[in-house]
Image (tube, rainbow, N blue to C red):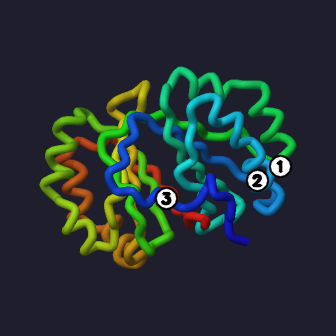
Amino acid sequence: MKHTSSNTMAEPSKKKVTFKHFLVVQHPVKSYEEWQPAFDAHESVRKQYGLTVLSVGRGLENSDMIFILMAAEDLKKAKEFSQSSNLKEIMQKAGVMATPIISFMNNVRSDFSAIPQKERIFLTHHVKKFETWLKVFDAEGQDTRAAHGMIDRGLARDAEDPKRVYLLFAVGDMKKIQARIKSPELKKIMADAGVEGAPVVHTYKVEG
């Protein structure tokens, strides 16, 4: 079943739209078909807190794992929303099966132009120094990443820990991506960039 709400369609088509902050929510649900109407019905409350849903995704490995990307006008209000008793009540009624993972981010760069690819990779890692990491990331370049199946969509920093980096890619070729992630070349690039520890990788498909 595709997500049909006009408020949660895949991604905005206006390329030049710029967002300052993001809120990403991840959680499993008992049933997507039961969760979706409850989520849509909560739209007016999200708007009161300055939140706009940019996309809703379902995990590629587990289709009942939900990924929600929202633009936030004000991170303080976004945090108030995440801690509200109303949200907890709605989640419980909607069949959310575990405590959600909620990330608050400051946008560095993003592209929300419409593209045909629906699958996404959401990657998180910690770096020693963001400026050093960014130079290496930019030296690698979008074209190189695209050649390995990874289409740049977003780059953000954690609002509380600016050394935590979030990357969003559209999937051009999953086999190429998997090979790239395992490659010695990428491991060297990450080491040169000062990446600390192994990255956390999630894959999902945008609904709508």
The image's mark for residue 11 is: 3
Cα–Cα span, label 1 and label 2: 5 Å
Mark 1 closeness class: few <14, some 14–19, many ≥20 residues within 10 Å: some
Q: Nearer the viewer, residue 138 or 85?
A: 85
Q: Is residue 23 visible?
A: yes
Q: Which residue is mark 2?
A: 29
Residue at figure coordinates x 47%, y 63% from the top left:
120
Mark 2 closeness class: few <14, some 14–19, many ≥20 residues within 10 Å: many
Q: CB atoms at circles 1 and 2 under 8 Å apart?
A: yes
Q: Is residue 197 visible?
A: no
Label tally:
3
Residue at figure coordinates x 56%, y 31% from the top left:
50
Residue at figure coordinates x 20%, y 68% from the top left:
144
Q: Which residue is mark 1?
A: 95
Give residue 138's position: percent from left, percent from top: 17, 52
Give whichever of discs 1 and 2 has the lower sequence position: 2
Q: Nearer the viewer, residue 130 or 47?
A: 47
Cα–Cα span, label 3 and label 1: 25 Å
Tell me the kind of residue under disc 3.
Glu
Give residue 165's position: percent from left, percent from top: 36, 41
Cα–Cα span, label 2 and label 3: 22 Å
Q: Quadrant of the C terminus?
A: bottom right
